[in-house]
Amino acid sequence: MTARTLPLDGVRVVEFGHTILGPCCGMILADLGAEVIKIEPPDGERTRRLRGFGTGYFAFYNRNKKSVTLDYKTPEGLAAARELIATADVLIENMAPGALARAGIGPEDAKRINPNLIYCSLKGFLDGPYADRFALDEVVQMMSGLAYMTGPPGMPLRSGTSISDITGGLFGAIGILAALRDRDQGKGGGHVVESALFETAAFLMGQFMAYSALTGKPVPPMPARVSAWAVYELFQSADGERVFIGITSDNQWRSFCAEFDRADLLHDVSLSTNEMRVDERARLIPDLIALFKTLSAKEIEQRCVKANLPFALIAHPEDLFDDPHLNANGSLAPTTLSDGIATKLPKLPIRIDGEAFELRNNPPAAGEHTAALLSAKR
């Protein structure tokens, strides 16, 4: 958004975050216009130095933020942290359980410093028997049934992204926005907002828990499910590409039969409705497998577009850099990373009155704003 004030303009957030959970929550608020001050240890957040899949964590989840380095376990650092908290509207933390309270900036301490503060604590578990356990995204995927649902029978598999961390950060941001709304309507001062990885993963399992309650049956993992749709499959093309095609209505079925020249299937009365086609999957799917093996991926794509069918070629993350749709509608933000690499990364998938939330600042260098923020009063 460039033509008007951003929704969270004037909101100051102090983020004691690391890795994904807290930083994701802070990034959402930053993208919406808040001034997010990221508190890092003197040598910078450890996430900056992660390797493997951790390489991209800091680069993606810390745009539009300012960085202050301090050690809140020292008297000087604690005083500086308290000074920032006194000027803030929101505090976000996903440190180890009790870490900030032991340092003297837990929820009760912060309330004394700033009675109107929204204090958001993002944890592994909410209060209960597991509260003191150490949690990770992968741990709660296993505990919640998410890994069971993702992999084939007997092979639980974590999802292909840090879904509990990211969604937990999103829920934290939603809670903060609700608390700010409540505060600004005069319904009291500050609030403590809590969200947690395990409860987030359990929420994602809600539809399957409802399935179990309604059917009285164990829930099969996704690869072994009985689909509600007769055609909801990965198929292989003549040139070896894999294409997902979903046909979820009788109108789509008629369009498919017309575009793929299968009048025989259209006129087969035993395939007239989706429910009837589900019953006939044993003979229908092998027929379609054979059909798609005679066509190139490009031809399948063209026909699916013409028939207005749900479909997708199988992409890799790096394919998104050149995705024509994302580039045409401005969904990728030109970003310069800390080592000077210029790239494009996804913006928040939100538009208000047709306007996206833009990159205003690249991910900061460690301590880039320490001098300015610790010497200035708000």
Image (tube, rainbow, N blue to C red):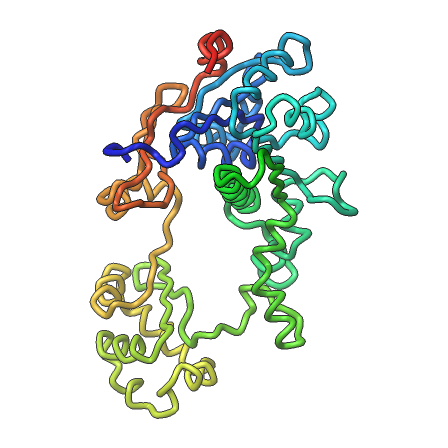
Quadrant in the picture for the N terminus: top left
In-image side of 242 versus 263 (left or right): right
Question: Residue 327 location in percent, x, y?
Answer: 25, 42
In-image side of 98 versus 315 (left or right): right
Task: Looking at the picture, tell me which residue is in the foreground, 226 or 190.
Answer: 190
Residue shown at 58%/26% (left/top)?
16
Residue 166 can be seen in this image? no
Quarter holding residue 280: bottom left
Question: Residue 176 location in percent, x, y?
Answer: 52, 39
Residue occupying the far right of the picture: 129
Question: Residue 313 location in percent, x, y?
Answer: 34, 56
Task: Looking at the picture, tell me which residue is in the foreground, 332 or 122.
Answer: 122
Q: In the rendered view, tell whether residue 76 sits above or below residue 346.
A: above
Question: Residue 94 location in percent, x, y?
Answer: 61, 32
Q: How many marks?
A: 0
Residue occupying the far bottom of the picture: 269
Residue shown at 27%/34% (left/top)?
4
Residue occupying the far front of the picture: 186
Task: Looking at the picture, tell me which residue is in the foreground, 63 or 267.
Answer: 63
Residue shown at 31%/74% (left/top)?
291
Quarter holding residue 309: bottom left
Quarter holding residue 152: bottom right
Q: In the rendered view, tell whether residue 190 sits above or below residue 282.
A: above
Residue shown at 31%/33% (left/top)?
358
Residue 11 can be seen in this image? yes
In-image side of 254 versus 247 (left or right): left
